[in-house]
Image (spheres, rainbow, N blue to C red):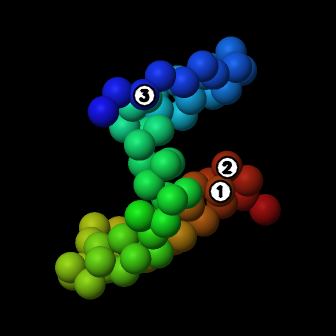
Amino acid sequence: MAVSVRLDPLIEAKLTQQAALLGVTKSEFIKDALERVLGMKNPATLLRQVRKAGKMGRPAASARVSVSMKAKLRAKRPD
């Protein structure tokens, strides 16, 4: 079902910007927001489902970030 809504230009600009940042269409962004506001989609539940699916990413990579960053900072400012 198609629904037409008039938006204030500032709201439309923010909508366009946020949708682009997330890589979704304005329609998808609005539908997602409505589902969350209406209680049809709970971000906490979705996060639990994703986490249950197993490990994500490279856990060892984040452990090395701290060491790498400290080394770069020390190289810039040797005291």
Q: CA distance from mark 3 to mark 1?
A: 53 Å
Quadrant of the snapshot with the C terminus: bottom right
Between circles 2 and 3, the one closer to the viewer is 3
Name the image quarter holding residue 46.
Answer: bottom left
The residue that mark 1 highlights is 73
Seen at 44% across and 39% down, the residue is 29
Residue 76: image tag: 2
The residue that mark 3 highlights is 3
Dot 2 or dot 3, earlier in sequence: 3
Question: Given the image, on which type of amino acid does mark 1 rest?
Answer: Leu
Please give left or right for residue 22 compared with residue 76 in the image: left
Q: CA distance from mark 2 to mark 3?
A: 56 Å
Dot 3 or dot 1, earlier in sequence: 3
Which residue lies most toward the right here?
79
Instruction: Kindly tell me whether residue 8 is visible in this rendering.
Output: yes
Q: In front: 74, or 64?
A: 64
The x, y position of residue 59, in whole percent, is 33, 76
The answer to whether the residue labelled 2 contacts the one labelled 1, judged by CB atoms less than 8 Å apart, is yes
Name the image quarter holding residue 64.
Answer: bottom left
- How packed mark 2 is, by other alpha carbons closer than 10 Å (few <14, some 14-19, many 20 or more), is few
Seen at 51% across and 59% down, the residue is 38
Say above or below: 44 vs 2.
Answer: below
Question: Given the image, on which type of amino acid does mark 3 rest?
Answer: Val
Question: Given the image, on which type of amino acid does mark 2 rest?
Answer: Lys
